[in-house]
Amino acid sequence: MASDTALVAGATGLVGKLCLETLLECGYYQQVIALARRPLDRRHPRLTEMIVDFDKLQEIDPFPAGDVFCALGTTIRRAGSQAAFMKVDFEYPRTIASRSATAGSKIFVLVSSVSADPRSPNFYLRVKGELENAIIALPFESTHIFRPSFLIGERAETRLGESIAAAIARPLRFTMVGPLRKYRPMPAATLARAMAAATRESAPGRHIHHYDEILALAGRL
């Protein structure tokens, strides 16, 4: 089912950058296309940079087909408003998914969030849940939704709230057992490995991965 082409959206962020590196290193794909606003500080014989205006995704013709890895995301603080956040965390990924499905892509891999729920009173989690539903509704043969908790790694921008929460959760992670295991923090590199591995074992249908499933997938790469 897996394609010989991978499309990475969000390749300059923490998870997207690590996912891009993982895909280039593992050799699963003959071509890895990075959708980016600006040129990447990376060169590789199998890497193709596609510089785009994310506000004009509908104008890309033809839109590339392949296994899609979407790690687009920001914070309300950095975006500046809920409307701006919605554009980055909902509208861009949904448009990429829709255009990819129309182009013939069969697999879509999405980085979401633990506790994502379209009925959540929390705006962030509600948007994540609404995006999941929008992606699931598209005709991909296989959809992988990753729901990590706090991610450990060096971001280009500082996310103070996430950094504080991760610092608190890290020493307490072994007390998070049973239903609480999915809230354990994990290295972003582990998530990136799991994303790459998921397309190799991709059964048809919808697959939602929490902490334990992510660790298991990462260990198979």
Image (spheres, rainbow, N blue to C red):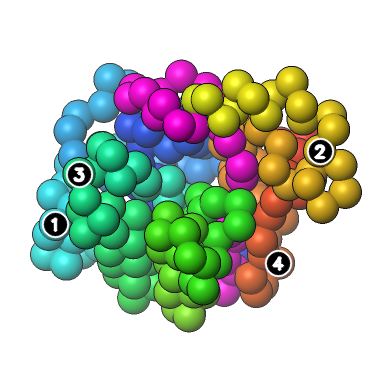
Q: Amino acid at mark 3?
A: Gly
Residue beneath the point at 30% across and 46% down: 76
Instruction: Point out residue 98 in the picture as x, y percentages from the top left corner.
Output: 34, 72
Find disc 1 in the rendering and name its residue: 55
Q: Secondary structure at mark 1?
A: helix
Q: Earlier in the sequence, mark 3 or mark 1?
A: 1
Find disc 4 in the rendering and name its residue: 203
> Does residue 161 appear left or right of residue 147 in this picture?
left
Q: Is residue 149 above or below residue 62?
A: above
Instruction: Point out residue 4 in the picture as x, y percentages from the top left corner.
Output: 49, 51
Range covered by the magenta-colored residues:
141-162
Indicate the quadrant where residue 194 lies.
top right
Q: Secondary structure at mark 3?
A: loop
Q: CA distance from mark 3 to mark 1?
A: 17 Å
Look at the image and tell me in which quarter the N terminus lies: bottom right
Q: Earlier in the sequence, mark 2 or mark 3?
A: 3
